[in-house]
Amino acid sequence: MDINALKKYISKTPDNPGIYRFQNKQKKDIYIGKASSIKKRLTSYGKTTDSRIQKMIMEAEYLSFIKTDSDIEALILESQLIKQRRPQFNIMLRDDKQYFFVGFTNETFPHLFLTHQPQLGPVSTSFIGPFTDGTTLKATLKYLRNIFPYCTCKQKHHNFCLNYHIGKCLGVCCLKQSDAISNLQLSISNYGKNIKAIKNILSGKKNSLIKELKKEMETVGKKHDFPRAIELRNKLERLERVFYNAQVIKHSEIIKSFDSGLSKLLKINKPIIKIEGYDISNIQGTYATGAMVSFTNGIPDKRHYRKFNIRQNFSTKNSGGQVRKPFGDTQMIAQILKRRFNHPEWPFPDLILIDGGKGQVSSALATLKEMNINIPVIGLSKNEKHIGHQLVIPKRISIGWQILSLTKLSVYDKNLLLTIDSEAHRFAISHYRELHRKSFH
């Protein structure tokens, strides 16, 4: 392939992350590379003075490429193809540089490590590689550890490590007394799942992992195990952020579900993309807190979560002096909505979901009307087992209410609203407990 032919191929390549493949007359790969920009990387080949690269280009007859959504995905795809095809120039052009491999020790709680020489590692250790870019590989493992925590402690210790407190370690994996912990088997199982997930991703099996996580999320959702469902949803969201490189992801299937489900149900003439959920947590007004969670395209957007400390009312009674007179739930809802919508810089939602019935929804509607804000509000009321079972919907045209059983909704819309309500409750409870703990100090 001469320089003019190379330039012709380059003109058809994208300015995207991905891998490129130089092939000989038999269309056998002779060199496979990755790039953050395929076009820019290949353009640099046209200006090279490296005799080895020039030789590779001259032996090549064809040039092809595969776009990926991120540099990380390009790294993994390149690794898989080099391992499968073993191109001759990939070895020749490495010089004194060596490929990276990720090692997984064979322990109850496996450790991960990077090496250039897997043949010198312990016999029982498994390896994934080769990887050409150590910097990107280390960044990938760093991202994945935030989603699938694993241990990096060099030795066992008595107290939880720092990584446990910042969510990068499950904790029991490096404790000396871990055998005495009642949920040890569950911890071993969860740790094993995290290691398996990382292996799948580094081996190019991301799609099968995502399918598995979605299936588990649906299963636990049907069992009303919403904390676990939210945890899995968060893992999926963060995985997407890693692989799509923080680009905006179009969830067309979810948006379609909104358009044909909630929008139609609530007689709203626009898609419901952003939903805010609100909940109150208190014991007879003590340490009362409010929480706001935000979901966009069905996915939690924690950047827009907010906590509110309820500012209680005080009044004077008889000769007893000043006595605390706590607000009721309806007054609390009004207070946090006023404070929330006094922040026009926070993106407004398309729908508000209140944990409660007619009283709470009426208070929310009155507050919004007072502030001249027109956003639909619905309530989720609970049955005697404190499980959400019906929607309280104010009629938008006439006066009155529509009470709708959740069984009338699609499975997706039902699970979405229950998940938002559960997440708001969890967030409110966590803030309440935080305030309660501080009171003891």
Image (cartoon, rainbow, N blue to C red):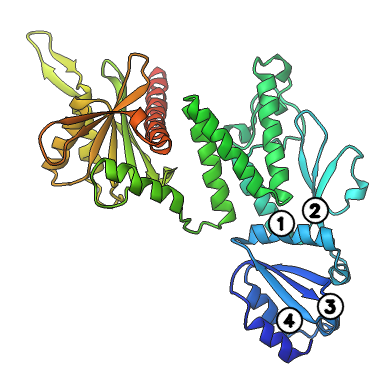
Q: Residues within 10 Å of mark 1 (few under 14, many from 20)?
A: many
Q: Is residue 389 left or right of residue 174?
A: left
Question: Of residues 307 and 88, which is closer to you in this image?
Answer: 88
Which of the marked residues, 2 or 4, is nearer the chain's N terminus? 4
Q: In the rendered structure, find residue 129 and report the number of the disc placed on it.
A: 2
Which of the marked residues, 2 or 3, is nearer the chain's N terminus? 3
Q: Is residue 272 left or right of residue 174?
A: left
Percent position of residue 387, x then y: 37, 21
Kind of residue at disc 3: Asn
Going by the picture, which residue comes out furthest to the top?
319
Q: Residues within 10 Å of mark 2 (few under 14, many from 20)?
A: many
Which of the marked residues, 1 or 4, is nearer the chain's N terminus? 4
- Residue placed at 43% from the left, 47% from the top? 254
Kind of residue at disc 1: Ile
Picture layout, residue 415 above or below residue 204: above
Kind of residue at disc 4: Tyr
* Distance CA(mark 1)–CA(mark 3): 24 Å
Q: Residues within 10 Å of mark 4 (few under 14, many from 20)?
A: some
Q: In the rendered structure, find residue 45 and report the number of the disc placed on it.
A: 4
Quadrant of the image containing the C terminus: top left
Q: Residues within 10 Å of mark 3 (few under 14, many from 20)?
A: some
Percent position of residue 373, x then y: 17, 46
Question: Of residues 256 and 143, which is closer to you in this image?
Answer: 256
* Distance CA(mark 1)–CA(mark 2): 9 Å
Picture layout, residue 151 above or below residue 160: below
Residue behind mark 3: 24
Q: In the rendered structure, find residue 330 and report the number of the disc placed on it.
A: none
Residue behind mark 1: 76
